Image: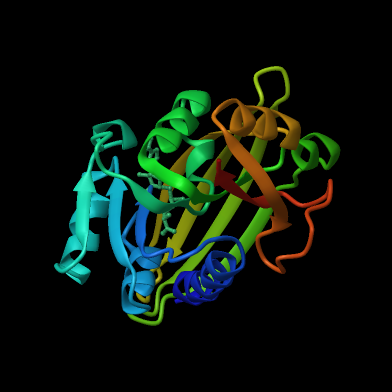
Amino acid sequence: MMGTNRATEECFTLQRIFNKYGSGIHRILDVGCGTGLHSNILYNMGCEVTGIDTSKDMIDIAKSKNSDIEFINGDIYSIGSNRKYDSVISMWNVMGYVPYIDDFISKVSDIIKSEGLFIFDVFNGIAVIDTKPQRTIKAKIDNATGDIIKRTGTPYVDLMNQTFTMKYRYDITKTDGRIETFNEEHDMIFYTPNQIKDMLEYDNFELLEMTNVYDCKKATKDDWDVRYIARKE
Ligand SMILES: C[S@@+](CC[C@H](N)C(=O)[O-])C[C@H]1O[C@@H](n2cnc3c(N)ncnc32)[C@H](O)[C@@H]1O
């Protein structure tokens, strides 16, 4: 449920951003919508939302949760240029997974209205370079099954290629004592704030704010998760 709580808080933050920098923001595209957490909350707040994700599994779950929202399985390039949105959002480092972020930003520019808001978060390259990420170990009990889930995360940084790989190992201790293990790997790209700013400006976006995603304060060099708020000219 932690994800839902975070998404709810972020949707209130999005509303504040819409009110502060936009006018009449109603039609929203949620790129990399996953299972539709943000899409659903924004829909319940009265927005018209389209969610899009390259993962069919994620989209199937999103559709099963709310059939009134348009959920599309595909990437942003499958959105026709005749469709225009008041705001495009891309939450939880989706853009770290996108191979050609400059093309991605150009496409957003193409499908967003003049004065529309583009809001996304992505790993801050300066923080990745400046702080050496450590191995993390977390454990929790699955309330539904009673299983103990231990997750060990081992980070790898490739500075020359600006990539960050997180390898997770899950050890699940079943209630009968059996242990099941599986691995998961996330390959992400990180960008410095100046790189992002340059790409936004190239596509006629003005960068309005860079904030820490959790406390919404001005981003610093130590913040890994940075939210960018940009407005199309
Ligand atoms: C960390 S999840 C974020 C999920 C979602 N935004 C949320 O808040 O629940 C990243 C998502 O981005 C999707 N994704 C990755 N590359 C994508 C792309 N090029 N276009 C659309 N979705 C993409 C993945 O399938 C995954 O669901």
Quick check: can you spot residue 191?
Answer: no
Q: Nearer the viewer, residue 21 or 13?
A: 21
Residue 160, above or below 17 = above
What residue is drawn where x is 79% and y is 37%? Answer: 126
Quick check: can you spot residue 65?
Answer: yes
Q: Residue furthest top?
A: 160
In the figure, is residue 53 to the left or right of 119?
left
In the figure, is residue 119 to the left or right of 164?
left
Location of the C terminus (image quadrant): top right
Residue 106, above or below 54 = above
Q: Nearer the viewer, residue 37 or 57?
A: 37
In x, y percent, where is residue 36? 32, 62
What residue is drawn where x is 53% and y is 75%? Answer: 12
In the figure, is residue 207 to the left or right of 217?
left
Residue 220, above or below 17 = above
In x, y percent, where is residue 147? 40, 73
In x, y percent, where is residue 79? 26, 38
Q: How is the image coloured?
A: rainbow
What residue is drawn where x is 37% and y is 65%? Answer: 26
Q: How many marks?
A: 0
In the figure, is residue 180 to the left or right of 129?
left
Q: Nearer the viewer, residue 7 or 196?
A: 196
Location of the N terminus (image quadrant): bottom left
In x, y percent, where is residue 144? 33, 80
Using the rendered view, name the quadrant where residue 87 is placed: bottom left
